[in-house]
Amino acid sequence: MKAQGSSEYLMLLAAVLVIAIVVVSLLLFYPKVTPDIRQTQSELYWSTAKPIAIVGALGGRTSYSCSSNAQGFLLKLKNMESSRIYIRGINISGSTNSPLFVEGDIVVGQGGIAGEPIVSTENFRSCTGLLHRNLSCPDIVLNPKKEKFVVVMPAFGFCSSVAQGWNSINPYVLADVDIYYETRGLLKLQRGTQKLFIPCHEYFYCKSNEECEDLYGRNFECVSGTCLPSSCT
């Protein structure tokens, strides 16, 4: 009987150890799969959202100015409806009246090539304050089943630690998105129930000036993990 009791005790102990190992393994593995799960959930929701879907997104620097907000998000919008839609404003993570840039040259930078932002906004037309029908701005028109690129430049929620950062110290941004639009003469709000997963361009954390100079060229400094032109520091 004692032998049987010892055997049962050992089997119970082994089962507890196996369960403990499984739990620890899941806890260690979970953080690694979380971004993938969030990205998948985001893509499933936003790629089919109606009336306006977001079928592409990328975050990072948009210009070289040291005195202005130089980061933003490139979004590829698609009209999922059968009638024309006018975009009147896009708020990212609660940042209201964010400047919008439309119909410019899309320049996606390749890592290591200095002088190429993810999006050059120089040839884009700025449409700040669309929600209030700024008449100096052109209409951002989404024709039925068609797509269009826009650049949103919110006041916060960046991929980098500072507005002028060239590299991204965050791998991605999870953002609440509100889209104000007009259709058939009515102003409406499309509020996402799922956060938008926005990958960040050139994600790494610099540790020395040399790293920044190797990637972007001379006259760059590493400041809090972010590569900045010396003129901006």
Image (spheres, helix red, strand yellow):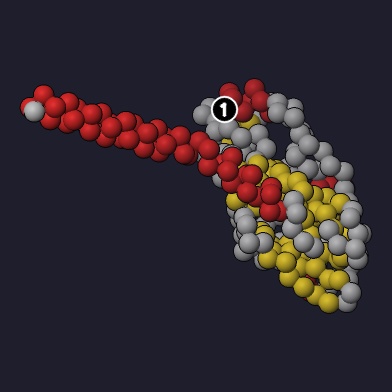
Q: Quadrant of residue 172?
A: top right
Q: For the view shown, which residue lies furthest in the left direction?
A: 2
Residue at 7 percent of width and 27 percent of height: 2
Residue at 75 percent of width and 54 percent of height: 48
Q: Is residue 189 left or right of residue 95?
A: right
* Of 152 and 161, the residue lying toward us: 152
Q: Which residue is mark 1?
A: 209
Q: Residues within 10 Å of mark 1 (few under 14, many from 20)?
A: some
* 217 versus 229 height, above or below: above
Q: Can residue 70 be seen here? A: no
Q: Position of residue 219 (x, y in %)?
A: 65, 30
* Of 56 and 65, the residue lying toward us: 56
Q: Can residue 216 be seen here? A: yes
Q: Position of residue 146 (x, y in %)?
A: 89, 53
Q: Is residue 185 left or right of residue 3?
A: right
User: Looking at the rendering, in which quadrant would you find the N terminus?
Assistant: top left
Q: Position of residue 52 (x, y in %)?
A: 79, 60
* 61 versus 7 height, above or below: below
Q: Position of residue 161 (x, y in %)?
A: 56, 45
* Total numbered labels: 1
Q: What amino acid type is highlighted by mark number 1?
A: Asn
Q: Is residue 186 left or right of residue 71?
A: right
Residue at 63 percent of width and 44 percent of height: 39
